[in-house]
Image (tube, rainbow, N blue to C red):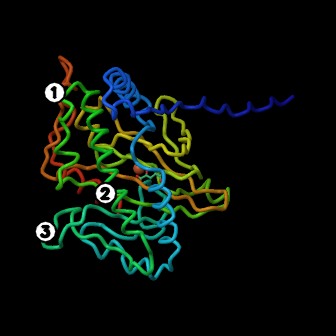
């Protein structure tokens, strides 16, 4: 008698912590130490967490998602008129299939990139003017994106203070890197087109990757599809779409800076199969181009050696961006 093949065992769910940071924002000392220790443990494993209790208003988030949906619904020709190829700073629209983050898959997503406004004369790598659609084509988009950008920059600064405390360095250790006017931060909004179950299984909304910069704060709508890789069991796990929360993940630069104390984690997006588009907005904080990233002293235990050569932020980013486009 033939043996029945065993049912495939599904991996146990991966718990992705949700950390309420409101106590820190209110200046409460005991809440702050609990938040800092939750961050310290979440950033070690699973290296992905979500935050709530921030000050970004739900009304602004709703307005942003509405304006983005209207923008992405414009004809491709209109969106291509502000294509990122026309920008030395990679700002503007990118079409489905133009980025490739995982070998063998082109990302099935559209993107719209925005950063701090800077004149063309003053441009540097990833710095320069934004490209906007005409106000008549995308009413309110510019205002909503810029307002969101400035709130996310402040929130990212807050997260860097908490990360600094969690690493045992001065609370303001990363302030200049994370929040000065020259620091590289950018927002990339995404629209993921729906696909059939069959197509979604064999393609990627966004291919498996780790983020290039220091810290990412991600807003996702309620459709779901973001997955994170758990290295010990080599399995993928969904990241629950929680209204009002931001997903936080460590990027490669912070991994290098902390000598792998905090490491970046592979993640990907599976195309939506519910028949609806999925929207998300990532805020990447990549810091000052001339900053040298080298092992933070508190991350080097006695007897340890730095695992990475010092590198400037600019060289690190040029290398990573160069490989994905
Ligand atoms: O859309 C998402 O949920 C993830 C986006 C992402 O990983 C990225 O832009 O780096
Ligand atoms: Fe990512």
**Residue at numbered disc 1:** 297
Q: Is residue 247 left or right of residue 88?
A: right
In the rendered view, tell whether residue 104 sits above or below residue 97.
above
Q: Are marks 1 and 3 in contact (CB under 8 Å)?
A: no
At a point 50% along the width and 77% down the height, the residue shown is 74
**Residue at numbered disc 2:** 186
Residue 309 position within the rendered picture, expressed as x and y whole percent measured from the top left: 16, 39
N-term mark: 1 or 3: 3
At a point 57% along the width and 64% down the height, the residue shown is 193
Q: Nearer the viewer, residue 108 or 123?
A: 123
Question: Local crowd at mark 1 within 10 Å, few (<14), some, or many (≥20)?
Answer: some
At a point 51% along the width and 64% down the height, the residue shown is 66
Distance between the alpha carbons at the discs numbered 3 and 2: 17 Å
Q: Is residue 127 left or right of residue 142?
A: left
Tag 2's secondary structure? strand
N-term mark: 3 or 2: 3
> Which numbered marker is on residue 46?
none
Question: Local crowd at mark 2 within 10 Å, few (<14), some, or many (≥20)?
Answer: many
**Residue at numbered disc 3:** 122
In the rendered view, tell whether residue 14 sits above or below residue 72.
above
């Amino acid at each position: 008698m033939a043996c029945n093949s065993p049912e495939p065992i599904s991996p146990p769910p991966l718990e992705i912590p949700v950390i309420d940071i409101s106590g820190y924002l209110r200046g409460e000392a005991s809440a702050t130490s609990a938040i800092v220790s939750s961050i310290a443990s979440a950033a070690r494993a699973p290296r992905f967490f979500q935050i709530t209790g921030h000050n970004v208003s739900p009304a602004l988030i709703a307005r942003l998602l509405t304006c983005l949906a209207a923008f992405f619904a414009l004809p491709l020709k209109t969106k291509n008129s502000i294509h990122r190829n026309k920008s030395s700073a990679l700002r503007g629209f990118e079409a489905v299939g133009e980025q490739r983050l995982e070998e063998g898959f082109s990302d099935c997503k559209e993107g719209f990139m925005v950063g701090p406004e800077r004149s063309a004369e003053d441009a540097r790598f990833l710095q320069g003017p934004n490209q906007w659609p005409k106000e008549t084509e995308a009413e309110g988009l510019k205002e909503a994106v810029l307002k969101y950008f400035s709130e996310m920059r402040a929130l990212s600064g807050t997260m860097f203070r908490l990360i600094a405390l969690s690493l045992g360095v001065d609370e303001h250790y990363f302030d200049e890197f994370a929040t000065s006017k020259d620091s590289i931060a950018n927002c990339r909004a995404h629209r993921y087109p729906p696909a059939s179950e069959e197509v979604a299984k064999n393609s990627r909304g966004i291919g498996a990757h780790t983020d290039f910069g220091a810290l990412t704060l991600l807003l996702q709508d309620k459709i779901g599809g973001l997955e994170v890789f758990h290295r010990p069991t080599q399995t993928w796990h969904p990241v629950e779409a929680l209204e009002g929360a931001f997903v936080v993940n460590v990027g490669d630069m912070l991994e290098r800076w902390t000598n792998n104390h905090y490491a970046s984690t592979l993640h990907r997006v599976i195309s939506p199969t519910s028949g609806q588009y999925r929207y998300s907005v990532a805020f990447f904080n990549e810091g000052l181009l001339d900053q040298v990233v080298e092992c933070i002293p508190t991350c080097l235990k006695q007897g340890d050696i730095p695992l990475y050569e010092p590198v400037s932020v600019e060289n690190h980013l040029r290398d990573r961006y160069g490989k994905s486009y």
